[in-house]
Structures are given as structure tokens and as C-alpha cells.
Image (spheres, rainbow, N blue to C red):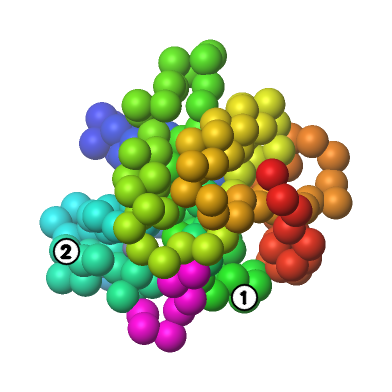
């Protein structure tokens, strides 16, 4: 194919869930109807690039016009409960489950010697600050159930010990190596209500 089409296919195929074949199909549909599909995609991409940012409080995605985000500023949510997740996307999974009405804190990863992610690469200092500052009574760790998730949970348990706050963890009735991103809303809701002390 000609370079502009090939470049577009290559760029799209780097997205999760889009293999080479689906990227090719999407690209050919886009160039087939440039006025309808391509222009709308360009506008949406430019808008996202210009206005999407991370909420300075929870780390989740929001827009520059709405910062801190809606979840952090909603007065009906429970300040006493703080849910710690690895990635901003996990916030949406938990929201979809409808099982949690507190606040969120995204770490931006988990402790991983293999990926050279140490405590200073994660949003741990701001977590400790939030817990000591605001009226948080329970920190719910919604982390993956692999070794790295376990190590991160253990680290946070120690980090927050001096604060005297209750630290709990999701109870997945599932084998290891599962987590927020892989669970359906109902499983997540059960994991939240069955949470256990760390
Ligand atoms: Zn927020």
C-alpha cells in the first residue's frame, strides 16, 4: 500500500485490541469516507490531545476544564473510603461494578523488579499524604493478584501502618494472576463486598 495508508495501519495496529487485520480494516474504512470518518477522528484526537490530563488528586483521566476530576469533587461520595488501583483504567472498571462509592488513588503501576518500577516511580508519597491529611478510615487495595500486586499490597500495608487506617484488599474468588482489569462488574462487586484485611 502507499506510505500514508501503511503509516496509518501501523499506528492503529499499536493500539490494544487492534491487530494488523483490524487496523487495516479500520484504515480502509477511514480513507473510504474521509469527510465523515477521517475528519471526525482527527478532530476527536486533537481534542483529546489538547484537553485530556491526569487528575492531580486521584491520577485518573479528566479534562483540563474539570480538574480535579468529577469523582474527586463529587460531594456525595464517601471521603472515609479510599480505593487504590494500579492504572487509571481500573477506576472505570470499579465504577462500572457499582460496588464502590468512595474516592480513588491510581498508583500508575505496581512494584516490579523486572520492569524496574520501584516505590519512587509510583504515586505512593501522595497516597500517604492523602491518608494522613483527609479523613480516610479505610484504604481498599484493588491490585492484581500476581506476585507484583502482592508485593505492592505488602509495601502499602507497611507504609500506612503508622496512620492506623484499616487496609483491606479485594477478595477475588479466583485463581492467581487476576485483577481489576480482567474482572466483570459482578465479580468486582463481590470482590469489593468480600474484601479482607491486609
Ligand atoms: Zn480525581
Report the side of 111 relative to 166 (left or right). left
Above or below residue 110? Residue 142 is below
Q: How crowded is mark 2: few (under 14 residues within 10 Å), some or many (20 or more)?
A: some
Above or below residue 117? Residue 70 is below
> Residue 116 appears at what percent x and percent y?
44, 16
Q: Which residue is painted at 67% across and 50% down in the image?
A: 169
Q: Is residue 21 among what the camera can see?
A: no
Q: Are marks 2 and 1 in contact (CB under 8 Å)?
A: no
Q: What are the residue bounds of the magenta stretch?
A: 74-80
Q: Which residue is painted at 61% across and 44% down in the image?
A: 143
Q: Which residue is painted at 68% across and 26% down in the image?
A: 147
Above or below residue 40? Residue 158 is above
Q: Locate the N terminus and report the quarter of the image it occupies.
A: top left
> Residue 48 appears at what percent x and percent y?
23, 58
N-terminal label among 2 and 1 = 2
Q: Which of 63 and 160 is in front in this view?
A: 160
C-alpha distance separating marks 2 and 1: 26 Å
> Residue 128 appears at what percent x and percent y?
39, 45
Report the side of 114 relative to 63 (left or right). right
What secondary structure is marked by label 2? loop
Q: Is residue 192 among what the camera can see?
A: yes
Q: Does the magenta stretch include residue 77?
A: yes
Residue matched to label 1: 98
Q: Residues within 10 Å of mark 1 (few under 14, many from 20)?
A: few
Q: Which residue is painted at 58% across and 39% down in the image?
A: 157
On the image, which quarter does residue 135 sit in? bottom left
Q: Which of 150 and 173 is in front in this view?
A: 150
Q: Which of 20 and 134 is in front in this view?
A: 134
Q: Locate the C terminus and report the quarter of the image it occupies.
A: top right
| Ligand 1: image quarter | bottom left
Task: Identify the disc placed on residue 64.
Answer: 2
Amino acid at each position: 500500500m502507499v506510505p500514508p495508508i501503511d503509516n496509518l495501519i501501523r499506528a492503529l495496529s499499536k493500539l490494544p485490541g487492534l491487530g494488523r487485520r483490524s487496523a487495516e480494516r479500520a484504515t480502509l474504512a477511514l480513507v473510504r469516507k474521509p469527510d465523515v470518518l477521517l475528519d471526525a477522528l482527527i478532530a476527536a484526537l486533537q481534542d483529546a490531545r489538547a484537553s485530556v490530563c491526569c487528575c492531580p488528586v486521584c491520577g485518573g483521566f479528566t479534562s483540563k476544564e474539570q480538574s480535579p476530576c468529577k469523582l474527586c469533587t463529587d460531594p456525595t461520595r464517601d471521603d472515609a473510603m479510599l480505593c487504590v488501583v494500579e492504572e487509571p483504567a481500573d477506576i472505570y472498571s470499579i465504577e462500572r461494578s457499582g460496588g464502590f462509592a468512595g474516592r480513588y488513588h491510581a498508583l500508575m503501576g505496581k512494584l516490579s523488579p523486572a520492569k524496574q518500577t520501584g516505590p519512587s516511580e509510583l504515586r505512593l508519597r501522595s497516597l500517604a499524604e492523602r491518608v494522613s491529611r483527609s479523613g480516610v478510615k479505610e484504604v481498599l487495595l484493588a491490585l492484581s493478584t500476581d506476585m507484583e500486586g502482592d508485593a505492592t499490597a505488602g509495601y502499602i500495608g507497611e507504609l500506612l501502618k503508622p496512620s492506623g487506617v484499616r487496609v483491606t484488599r479485594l477478595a477475588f474468588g479466583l485463581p492467581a494472576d487476576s485483577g481489576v482489569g480482567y474482572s466483570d462488574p459482578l465479580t468486582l462487586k463481590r470482590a469489593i463486598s468480600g474484601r479482607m484485611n491486609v
